[in-house]
Image (cartoon, grey):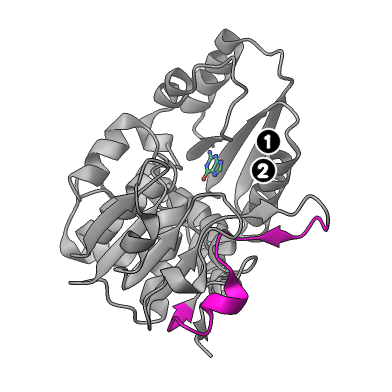
Amino acid sequence: MPTILDGKALAASIRRRIQEEAAKLPRRPGVAVILVGDDPASQLYVTNKIKDCGECGFFSRLIHYPVSVSEEELLGAISKLNDDAAIDGILVQLPLPASFNERRIIESISPAKDVDAFHPLNVGRMVQGDSVLWPCTPRGIGRLLDAYHICVDGKTCVVIGRSEIVGKPMGLLLLQRHGTVIYCHSHTQDLAAMTRLADILIVAAGRPGLITADMVKDGAVVIDVAMNRDPVTGKFTGDVCFDEVKDICSHITPVPGGVGPMTRAMLLENALTLARLHMGLLAFDKTSAALLEEYH
Ligand code: GUN
């Protein structure tokens, strides 16, 4: 049996630590979450985020707009939150309904309150390798690798998916840790030939059953980011055929209970980082090795 990377347990211990750290601050960290429309999956994610904030002693605000809200109104709400001293982190749940200019909305969030690290300034810092903020999913996967002493240095890392939220920043994080990174996506010609090279395989395609045992190298570390809801059973499954791949790999994440809880915990950690910045306890330009070690 491989080692199961238990994101649920690790996330719970991280939340406890965050709660303790937050209690030491001069005021409660504050997070605002904006949801537009009634997508059930987005509603569930947002509810969980608000619940996590409460559990860690954070102040939180959920702002829920109908799909008919205008872009100007949304921008106005973000502008107010940018100026609100009680709010350290602003999150706009993605995807937004198709009528919205997602980039314009994300760019209107102050980079200093960009708890997702999606603003171009924070993306730029990330590309340059000196950001204190990372998007939550790659950061959570990084923490999971740390917790199980999985070293990236010199390893061949294959990332399937090139989204702004997961795939692209995931590759950058692995590169920063000195991995040799291969990005695969829907135009990749021979996916199996690529995945078989992987010492560390990160799968974020959203295609159930995509990764079968014959596509995985012996002893690989397999990280399944996907959360696909089975239309018949309603249960969540990943992109990896867990039951067959588990006999080949050395480590694997379960779905659910692997990456998902880590993503949630990293939102809190990013918010705590921003709260410390706003309270003058941390500087944006303080990019020493010690700081990076503490926050990655
Ligand atoms: N939609 C799916 N994942 C995320 C995330 O990490 N942040 C935001 N804002 N939206 C998402």
As helix, strand or loop, the secondary structure at mark 1 comes to strand
In the rendered image, the vertical position of residue 80 relative to residue 282, given as above or below: above
Q: Give the x, y percent position of residue 251.
A: 45, 80
What crowding class fits label 1: few (fewer than 14 Cα within 10 Å), some (14-19), or many (20 or more)? Answer: some
Q: Nearer the viewer, residue 71 or 233?
A: 233
Q: Is residue 158 left or right of residue 287?
A: right
Q: Nearer the viewer, residue 235 or 85?
A: 235
Q: Amino acid at mark 2?
A: Val
Q: Give the x, y percent position of residue 46.
A: 67, 43
Q: Quadrant of ligand 1?
A: top right
Q: Nearer the viewer, residue 112 or 161?
A: 161
Q: CA distance from mark 2 to mark 1?
A: 8 Å
Q: Which residue is mark 2?
A: 46
Q: Amino acid at mark 1?
A: Leu
* Mark nearer the viewer, 2 or 1: 2
Q: Which residues are magenta?
A: 233-251
Q: Give the x, y percent position of residue 213.
A: 49, 74
Q: Residue at x 52, y 48 (%)?
A: 29
Q: Is residue 221 left or right of residue 49?
A: left
In the rendered image, the vertical position of residue 288 relative to residue 284, given as above or below: below
Q: Residue at x 53, y 80 (%)?
A: 246
User: Quadrant of the image for the C terminus?
Assistant: bottom left
Q: Is residue 61 left or right of residue 206?
A: right
Q: Which residue is mark 1?
A: 62
Tally of numbered tags? 2
Q: Is residue 76 left or right of residue 296?
A: right
Does mark 2 have its CB less than 8 Å from ligand 1?
no
Among the 4 quarters of the image, the one containing residue 106 = top left
Q: Nearer the viewer, residue 171 or 203?
A: 203
